[in-house]
């Protein structure tokens, strides 16, 4: 995976004010403009510790500057492990992890999700669960005294079916 | 004071019934001694968590559908997986606090003749052990002292986070709950560097190398502290620390050899359940040495 471009200079011409307004309009995640760049998020991040290209503070700054394209088309957001460390540590109570999650949704919507993520989504919508419980699984379950389970979740499949 | 039989709809999620039967076996085993009755709800689907990054609304719908299934039976939910517990709790939190969102979700649920009302409570298995069963009761069922067993607990992320959904249950900055339960069965809880760190699991789908490096960091810290084994409460974390441990050893050249047990496996050992009853034979890192060390200390 490439994490190119994360260190390059940004131009204000790339800023998208509508994007800032869009995120800000959500009561739930709109507090991101309170970020004063203290860096507590990045300091505690377990992913940053093993890969310096991943930097939640940088994501927050890019958001404040409205750099939608960079965020949504870039690979950085997909390195977030969803562990909520940054969010729990943030002195301004910015919902950093929830915001990054929302950015992943925007990226997916525009076709920028990593293959693993889109494959999993398709699998889930086709089956209602990630793993099908086949006859072999159920045999092993019964042998251990565990109740057998249906192969797929039919109701969930109906619920998620596209109109 | 006995509370009588406590009934819960058991939410297994996707990973546990297919890949982590050791967790399910041990949880059911100890539950049978603690007056917990698990009711099977066949239509339970995925909790929605794996959809959160790609389809927030779909994730919420799945979460809500599962909540409805428990509501129809008048049951609260016991989740074994931390991600499931988190997703279902988060769904209830959002639906209960946002009327518009609840109406929108209910319009979708109507297609499968369901309606979310908000009468169901979701709890992680460990929280049930602590709050509903109680430490006294667990202590009373302990047949064998695990004194001297040095356990490094990994709380993981979604068991306690995001904290805004969990109504002040434990403190993710200084978590205690899992260790309190272990203390009740005589275990020596040991501390290690960066105990709060994530297992790396959710990054697997987008960058395996980075994910496994996060796991390796934690294994190093646990090893450095001299733990006999790890304790955890999530099948995703187990996948990273247990199933992937051999691969990380090969790659890093470090021999970890740290058995990774689920909380009910450790409690089950204290209660005197057998290796097979607790599914210890299904763990990736061999636990035999650990078991015989316990056996030896018991006899001495």
Image (spheres, rainbow, N blue to C red):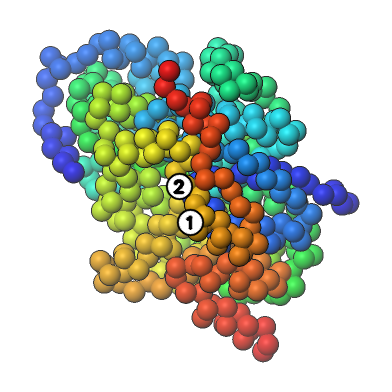
C-alpha separation, residue under disc 1 versus residue under disc 2:
9 Å
Estimate the x, y position of residue B85 in percent, counting from the top left: 57, 41
Q: Please indicate, yes or no, whether residue B262 appears anywhere in the rendered image.
A: no
Pointer 1 local density, CA inside 10 Å: few below 14, some 14–19, many at least 20: some
The residue sitting at 37% across, 62% down in the picture is B244
Which label number is shown at residue B19?
1
> In this rendering, is residue B190 above or below A64?
below
Estimate the x, y position of residue B279 in percent, counting from the top left: 57, 67
The residue sitting at 59% across, 48% down in the picture is A149
Q: Nearer the viewer, mark 1 or mark 2?
A: 2
Q: Nearer the viewer, residue A27 or A78?
A: A78
Q: Secondary structure at mark 1?
A: helix
Q: Secondary structure at mark 2?
A: loop
Kindly indicate the quadrant of the structure image that contains residue A138. Answer: bottom right
Left or right of residue B65, residue A1 in this image: left
Pointer 2 local density, CA inside 10 Å: few below 14, some 14–19, many at least 20: some
Q: Chain of mark 2?
A: A
Q: Please indicate, yes or no, whether residue A22 appears anywhere in the rendered image.
A: yes
The residue sitting at 46% across, 15% down in the picture is A27
Q: Chain of mark 1?
A: B
Estimate the x, y position of residue A37 in percent, counting from the top left: 30, 29
The residue sitting at 31% across, 56% down in the picture is B212
Residue located beneath label 2 in the image? A131
User: Residue pushed farthest front?
Assistant: A135
Left or right of residue A9, residue B40 in this image: right
Which label number is shown at residue B194?
none
Question: Is label 1 in contact with label 2 (beta carbons under 8 Å)?
Answer: yes
Kindly indicate the quadrant of the structure image that contains residue B182. Answer: bottom right
Q: Nearer the viewer, residue B106 or A28?
A: B106
């Amino acid at each position: 995976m490439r994490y190119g471009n994360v260190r390059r200079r940004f131009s204000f011409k790339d800023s998208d004010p509508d994007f800032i307004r869009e995120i800000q309009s959500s009561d739930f995640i709109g507090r991101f403009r309170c970020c004063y760049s203290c860096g507590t998020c990045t300091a505690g991040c377990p992913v940053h510790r093993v890969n310096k290209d991943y930097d939640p503070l940088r994501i927050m700054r890019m958001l404040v500057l409205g750099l939608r394209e960079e965020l949504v088309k870039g690979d950085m957001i997909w390195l977030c492990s969803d562990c909520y460390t940054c969010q729990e540590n943030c002195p301004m109570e910015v919902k950093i992890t929830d915001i990054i999650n929302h950015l992943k949704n925007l990226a997916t919507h525009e076709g920028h999700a990593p293959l693993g993520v889109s494959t999993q989504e398709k699998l889930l919508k086709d089956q209602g669960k990630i793993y099908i419980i086949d006859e072999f699984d159920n045999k092993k379950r019964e042998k251990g005294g565990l109740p057998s389970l249906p192969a797929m979740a039919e109701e969930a499949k109906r619920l998620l079916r596209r109109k | 004071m006995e509370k009588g039989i406590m009934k819960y709809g058991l939410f297994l999620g996707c990973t546990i019934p297919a890949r982590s039967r050791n967790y399910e076996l041990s949880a059911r085993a100890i539950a049978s001694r603690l007056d917990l009755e698990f009711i099977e709800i066949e239509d339970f689907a995925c909790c929605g968590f794996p959809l959160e990054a790609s389809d927030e609304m779909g994730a919420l719908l799945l979460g809500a559908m599962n909540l409805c299934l428990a509501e129809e039976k008048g049951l609260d939910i016991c989740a074994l997986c931390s991600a499931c517990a988190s997703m279902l709790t988060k769904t209830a939190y959002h639906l209960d606090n946002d009327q518009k969102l609840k109406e929108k979700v209910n319009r979708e649920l109507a297609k499968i003749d369901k309606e979310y009302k908000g009468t169901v409570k979701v709890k992680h298995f460990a929280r049930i052990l602590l709050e509903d069963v109680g430490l006294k009761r667990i202590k009373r069922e302990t047949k064998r002292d695990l004194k001297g067993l040095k356990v490094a607990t990994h709380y993981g992320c979604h068991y306690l986070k995001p904290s805004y959904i969990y109504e002040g249950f434990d403190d993710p900055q200084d978590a205690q709950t899992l260790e309190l339960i272990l203390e009740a069965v005589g275990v020596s809880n040991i501390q290690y560097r960066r105990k709060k760190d994530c297992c790396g699991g959710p990054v697997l789908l987008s960058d395996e190398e980075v994910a496994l490096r996060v796991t390796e960091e934690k294994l190093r810290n646990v090893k450095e502290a001299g733990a006999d084994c790890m304790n955890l409460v999530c099948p995703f974390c187990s996948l990273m620390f247990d199933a992937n441990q051999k691969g990380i050893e090969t790659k890093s050249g470090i021999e970890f050899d740290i058995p990774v047990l689920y909380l009910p496996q450790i409690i089950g050992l204290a209660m005197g359940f057998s290796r097979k009853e607790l599914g210890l034979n299904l763990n990736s890192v061999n636990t035999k040495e650990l078991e015989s060390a316990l056996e030896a200390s018991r006899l001495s």
